[in-house]
Amino acid sequence: MGRIRDLVGQALEAGYLSLAAEEQLRVLLQTRNEPEEITAFMRLQQAAMTGRVRQESREPSQRLSL
């Protein structure tokens, strides 16, 4: 299983995407990926948009510290 799929699976299971995982995704997405990896990332985006996964970077306490 690829790294993006691993991170996505963990986020979907936990319902939460940490800052560290988000940064790992940014790094991984800068390289060429298999279609399955991109599909997994799109599933994560959809889950975040519908509220099934919360993002630490979008929580109020994080916005104040930026």
Image (spheres, rainbow, N blue to C red):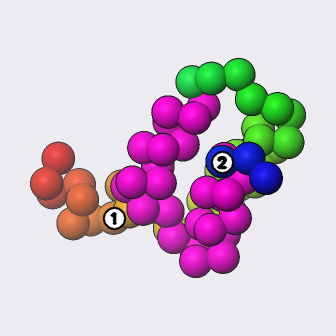
Give the residue displayed 46% in from the left and 49% down from the top: 22
Mark 1 / mark 2, whichever is N-terminal:
2
Mark 1: which secondary structure? loop
Does residue 52 show up?
no
Outermost residue toward the front in this view:
1
Does residue 59 show up?
yes
Residue 54 position, x and y percent, is 50, 68
- Residue 30's disc is none
Residue 62 position, x and y percent, is 24, 59
Position of 13 relative to 61 (above/below): below
Q: Main secondary structure of the magenta part?
A: helix
Give the residue displayed 77% in from the left and 41% down from the top: 37
Q: Name the residue that disc number 1 marks.
A: 59
Q: Which residues make up the magenta segment?
A: 4-29
Q: Amino acid at mark 2?
A: Arg
How many angstroms separate mark 1 from mark 2 (CA)? Answer: 25 Å
Q: Amino acid at mark 1?
A: Glu
Relative to 63, 21 lies left or right: right
Q: Is residue 25 magenta?
A: yes
Decide: few, some or many residues near mark 1? Use Cα within 10 Å; few <14, some 14-19, many ≥20. Answer: few
Outermost residue toward the right in this view:
35
In this view of the protein, which residue sits in the foreground, 40 or 48?
40
Residue 66 position, x and y percent, is 17, 47
Quadrant housing residue 9: bottom right
Q: Name the residue that disc number 2 marks.
A: 3
User: Mark 1 near mark 2, Cβ–Cβ under 8 Å?
Assistant: no
Relative to 15, 37 lies left or right: right
> Number of marks in the image?
2
In this view of the protein, which residue sits in the foreground, 17 or 27?
27
Give the residue displayed 71% in from the left and 22% down from the top: 32
Decide: few, some or many residues near mark 2? Use Cα within 10 Å; few <14, some 14-19, many ≥20. Answer: few
